[in-house]
Amino acid sequence: MYLLRGASEVVTPRPAVKPHFGDAMGVVDRRANTDILIEGDKIIKVAKHIEAPGAEVIDVAGKVVVPGFVDPHTHLVWAGSREHELEWKLKGKSYQEILADGGGILRTVRETRAVDESELREQTLKRFKKAVQFGTTTIEIKSGYGLDEDTELKQLRVANWLKSLNLADTVVTFMGAHAFPEGLSRVEYVSEVIRILPLVKDLAEYCDVFCEEGAFTVDESKEILTAAKSLGFKLKIHADEFGDTGGGRLGAELGVITADHLAGSSLETIKELSNSGVIGVLLPGTPFALLSDHYSPARKMIANNLPIALATDCNPNCYTESMQLVQQLAVFRMGMTPAEALVSSTINAAFAIGKKDRGVISEGWRADLLICDVPDYRHLTYHFGINHVDTVIIGGKIIDG
Ligand code: NIG
Ligand code: FE
């Protein structure tokens, strides 16, 4: 049992059974001079002064406590790096041109295929630990740098190994449909992804497809996601990253749990997503890393009642593990408020990966908590570029280092 004693403020989204949207996305409760009692993996009491004989007391005076961040979209398992591509981007080469020339995702596929599983574990573990240090307590991890059966399985095993460490809670997604591998036709590879689906059923809960010009067409995406749905996978889609190319509308039609990116979605598409109960996962690190000003229209989404979650998209193109940076970009570049950024990185992000027990500091919720060295929770976004997280608590356990 732990007693967090005397937080200068405890800040939390309101408890809810579905993600917050509209004006409610901008509401957090702020409780000054508050204690939190944890037993097992649950929060059992939040009050001004708690007496709990036998509990280990942790002094959090002068600190702000918020729910652990949930990162619902990462490509964390890869080998190698692509720093040279940043220089190409600076010279004006686009993301899709780099991919079409065999770079980008395809470069990382070659590097990920070339390493053995223990090397891949080691490279990924470093990023996983970094994410936790920056406050991520639940993380989604996709495959998609294999594009063949062996390497996709290798990536998914690494993701499941991370899950077994009981550090950050982990949700795994199969994303064989991330790019077209060299050496197969489009038709052949779509069939290959569908053939692999049942082989990864025990290793992945979600199936995701990169639906975009230069990647999978709407028809190809539909074929793969429909096959995945019939096998019992939950669905996600990378959609409308560069323009409204039909991915968002397909997501609405199929009833995906989340449609991710949505930087180019039209108002019509935003309304369809919102009417279909889809959550929009916004990834402001991606335009930032692409040297682009093309951010998702968050204000338009909030005005049209689309629930928003934020995520890092951590990958070798957009290389950050920090949900703090993502919230800062959401505020500075997408016009979200600090409260909206926090709600979108906690309870809403948890719903984006099907977790209904976390992202709120209240009795009965999972004890995923961050003790932050800030005078006011708004400093999490206002004071940018440093790590504000002092201590991370995941499932009631204090994480070292
Ligand atoms: O979500 N857009 C597709 N996939 C990733 C990028 C992966 C990569 O460039 O390696 C994304 O941005
Ligand atoms: Fe992505």
Image: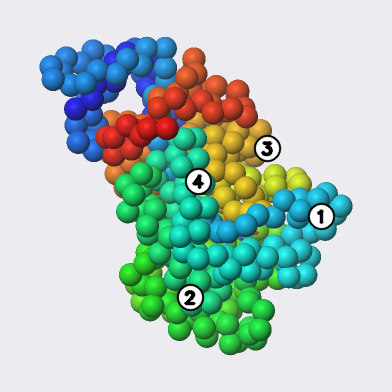
| Contact, mark 3 vs mark 1 (Cβ under 8 Å) | no
- Element under disc 1: helix
Q: Nearer the viewer, residue 28 or 122?
A: 122
From the top left corner, tell me how far across and down residue 231 is, in percent.
36, 76
The CA distance from mark 3 to mark 1 is 23 Å
Write down the residue under mark 3.
333
- Amino acid type, label 4: Lys
- State the residue at coordinates (50%, 46%): 126
- Amino acid type, label 1: Trp
The CA distance from mark 3 to mark 4 is 29 Å
From the top left corner, tell me how far across and down residue 45 is, in percent.
22, 25
Visible residue check, residue 273: no
Above or below, 298 relative to 379: below
- Amino acid type, label 3: Arg
Above or below, 235 relative to 67: below
Write down the residue under mark 2.
150
Q: Is residue 128 left or right of residue 334?
A: left
- State the residue at coordinates (45%, 84%): 195
- Amino acid type, label 2: Asp
Q: Quadrant of the N terminus?
A: top left
Write down the residue under mark 4.
126
Extreme-left residue of the structure: 53
- Element under disc 2: helix
Q: Between disc 1 and disc 2, whose residue precedes?
A: 1
* Total tally of numbered discs in the picture: 4
From the top left corner, tell me how far across and down residue 331 is, in percent.
61, 33
Q: Residues within 10 Å of mark 4 (few under 14, many from 20)?
A: few
Write down the residue under mark 1.
88
Q: Quadrant of the C terminus?
A: top left
- State the residue at coordinates (69%, 55%): 82
Viewer-side label of 3, 2: 2
